[in-house]
Image (cartoon, rainbow, N blue to C red):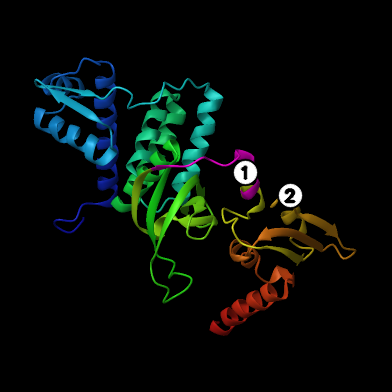
Amino acid sequence: MTDKGLADPSERSSAKHDRLARFYRVVRYLQSHPEGASPDAIASFVGMSRRTVYRDLQALEGEIGIPLWSEDGRWGIVEGAFLPPLRLTLDEAVAFFFAARLMAQFADRYDPDTGAAFQKLAEILPPVVAGHLARTIDVLASRPADDRQTRHLRLLARAWAERRIVELTYDAATYSPGRPLRRARVHPYLIEASATTRAIYLMGFDESRGAVRTFKLQRIVELALTPDTFEPPDPAVVQAGLDRAWGVIADQEEVQVELRFDAAIAPLVTETTWHPTEQVTREADGSILWRARVPGTLEIRRWILQWGAQVEVLAPPELRAEIGGILGAAAARY
């Protein structure tokens, strides 16, 4: 039994999923009636009360961000609010299903836009696969919401699509305690998700720094669109930056990283290509020497630490000292 006034987590998750599914039915009905529809007609279609339909219409605008119009008692979707229909083969839809599963693994907050997208995908999948996706939606719906992050992501998506410059206030104190907030005008080049840090990043040209910088979405305190536009860079240049990065951070000075992996885990390391610049040399004792050039060591540090005592940092010396210090401090705790 649950305490009075406290809903069971599974019940909250189910309620969110049901609400999301209802939103989708309302949208689908409005899409099939471009001339608009009355709340009574919508209520009849979704099997809910007129009062619930009014609440859903307000939520579609306020929470999901779907532009609606209302005139003479009829409601409709503003023309051009949706992208053209996407026709997928089964194999293509399953590829999106994999993306949904990965998203569920790293997302620690509920995003209504992600949930709505997966709900639409479930509608076109075979029942067996759709059932698994429905459970993925339940997992996402069980996470707490972050209204500020959702709002900022929507603004960034719009800025990215419309090539609009954004002004933001950024908090970098996580890695540099005591650093004050800073303002920046940024040209959004790319929005990228990282499964490693379970976060979303903005990559763009920072006018105040005169260079491309990476901003973690969770650290953006304030964000606003400006009317100013920018000329995007060559897509190949942006992709080249991503290819250089270990994860998403490509704006640091490149360093040569050299590691030695024990023979016991050498097969596990070599069965995956971890970075496009990597070079692997097998030693007579079965161990391997692994080399790659990466922008900074912040992201690769996490990867090195996951191998524990079965990897040794050979270069650069600063990284060797850092990893040694971390492992030494950890050993002292035990």
Q: What is the x, y in percent for residue 270?
A: 76, 53
Indicate the quadrant where residue 234 lies: top right
Q: Secondary structure at mark 1?
A: helix
| Disc ID at residue 271 | 2
Point out the residue furthest to the bottom here. Answer: 332
Residue depicted at x 47% and y 56%: 215
124 up-or-down from 236: above or below: above
Q: Report the side of 267 relative to 326 (left or right).
A: right
Query: Which residue is painted at 57% across and 79% down in the image?
Result: 330
Label 2 vs 1, first from the N-terminus: 1
Which of 244/183 is in front? 183
Q: Position of residue 290 (x, y in %)?
A: 77, 60
- Three-letter code for the amino acid on which mark 1 is drawn: Gln
Q: Secondary structure at mark 2?
A: loop
* Residue 143 in view (yes/no): no
Q: Choose between 218 and 205: the one closer to the eye.
A: 205
Q: Residues within 10 Å of mark 2 (few under 14, many from 20)?
A: few
As measured in the structure, the alpha-carbon distance from the residue carrying label 2 to the one carrying label 1 is 25 Å
At x 74% / y 52%, what residue is drawn? 277
Viewer can see residue 76:
yes
Q: Which residues are magenta?
A: 228-241
Q: Residue furthest right?
A: 284
Location of the C terminus by quadrant is: bottom right
Q: Is residue 136 above or below residue 196?
A: above
Q: Which class describes the residues within 10 Å of circle 1: few (<14), some (14-19), or many (20+)?
A: few
Q: Which residue is mark 1?
A: 239
Q: Is residue 175 above or below residue 279?
A: below
Frontmost of labels 2 and 1 is 1
Q: Is residue 287 magenta?
A: no
User: In the picture provided, is 285 more to the left or to the right than 73?
Assistant: right
Q: Amino acid at mark 2?
A: Glu
Residue 301 in picture, x, y percent from top left:
62, 66
